[in-house]
Amino acid sequence: MLIEYCLIPPNLLSFSNLTASSCSSQGTLKKIICRSSGNYIRKGALCKLRWSTNEKEEKMELHILEHRLKVASIAKDGIQLFTHGLIKLAFLPSKTRCKFFSLTETPEDYTIIVDEEGFKELPRSDLLSVADETWLALNVVSGGGSFSSSQPIGVTKIAKSVIAPLADHNISVFMLSTYQTDFILVRERDLPLVMHTLSAEFTILRVVNGEPVAADHLGITNGFVKPKLVQRPVIHPLSSPSNKFCVTSLDPDTLPTVATLLMDVMFYSNGMKDSAVGSDENGHIRFFSFSLIEGYISLVMDVQTQQRFPNNLLFTSASGELWKMVRIGGQPLGFDECGIVAQIAEPLAAADIPAYYISTFKFDHALVPEENINSVINALQVSQNKKQ
């Protein structure tokens, strides 16, 4: 196994175009740190590559990250009470010990996913609703390494190996896709069952002080009873707003230069009047997601918001593709039902359509390539009809 750094050629379009002739190594490309939409990478980027001369496919790894997470909702009319703490978490990470922070604004509320250290920055209020359980983040990587140094898998790529088996074993998941990777959140109390369900497919490692080590049995004993498979009959309505979205990132060193703009986008844009409405007459909805996880920034925004940022500041894919949203749920989904993510991920996987997936406190959201939106809606409706 060889590891090297390589300047990605400007004419390179995707991983499939990256061959040994592009750099100095000979063999099969196994890993690359650059992630963008789907398999696209940033032109001219300096990427760490891992090459393998062994044609035997390496077994995928499931990493249990060390963050213990809280999932919370902030009411739209109460955001002013929380801006001080949220600004610290987003823009002044050195002032906190938080390593995992995500904020997603939807028409209904702000969803916060934050580790226990970051949660201390949020004041207690009736306007803050917190899911009862502590959650753990799982990350699937191909052939080892952390989420920041592995080729992305994608939610549709793990539909059969992770999402569907967990749903079949009555394990609820909460998804967070970012520019860099996809996080699968599970309740801490469900971890032994998660490991039991997925151990045949993955090498399971626990991340300790930033390094993956062999996971122990986490309470699994010889008396552990294999759970029975459960039915997943619930079908949720789907909708697709007219927004076009981009999934992007920026260099953390440039964050101070756009801090004022980001604060305006996150807390003050559209005003309370527009936010209460949730969507306009053109079918647009308010949706913005910011994540700062282990020093890596991820942004999901519509093209109107993207145009407010300086040119060449945001990372974009070589193709510059845009994404359309499928919104899942007619009523708030809650946290106990299983199979919601699988309802979307399985048909998309069967159609080989990539997707980002972001769960929020009340609804779920899948982002698919703009050109695929009609076929996605059709595939999901066909899948739902078969289950009814």
Image (cartoon, rainbow, N blue to C red):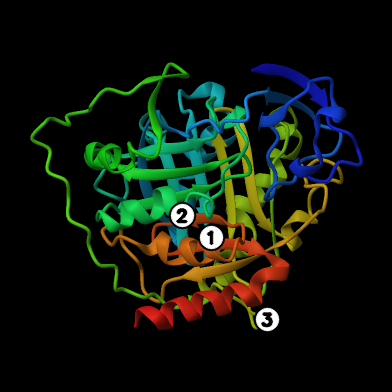
Q: Label 1 is placed on what type of residue?
A: Ala
Q: Please tell me which residue is depicted at 78% across the width and 23% down the height of the picture.
A: 26
Q: Is residue 179 left or right of residue 199?
A: right
Q: Which residue is mark 1?
A: 349
The answer to which of 353 and 20 lies nearer the viewer is 20
Q: In the rendered structure, are the residues bearing label 1 and label 2 in contact, judged by CB atoms less than 8 Å apart?
A: yes
Decide: few, some or many residues near mark 3? Use Cα within 10 Å; few <14, some 14-19, many ≥20: few
- Kind of element beneath mark 3: loop
Q: Label 2 is placed on what type of residue?
A: Ala
Q: Please tell me which residue is depicted at 45% across the width and 56% down the height of the picture.
A: 359
Distance Cα–Cα, label 3 vs label 2? 33 Å
Q: Nearer the viewer, mark 1 or mark 3?
A: 1
For residue 159, the mark is: 2
Q: Is residue 206 left or right of residue 76?
A: left
Decide: few, some or many residues near mark 2? Use Cα within 10 Å; few <14, some 14-19, many ≥20: many
Q: Which residue is mark 3?
A: 282
Q: Label 3 is placed on what type of residue?
A: Asn
Q: Please tell me which residue is depicted at 76% across the width and 43% down the height of the picture.
A: 16
**Residue furthest out toward the right:** 11
**Residue furthest out toward the left:** 223
Q: Position of residue 197 (x, y in %)?
A: 28, 44
- Kind of element beneath mark 1: helix
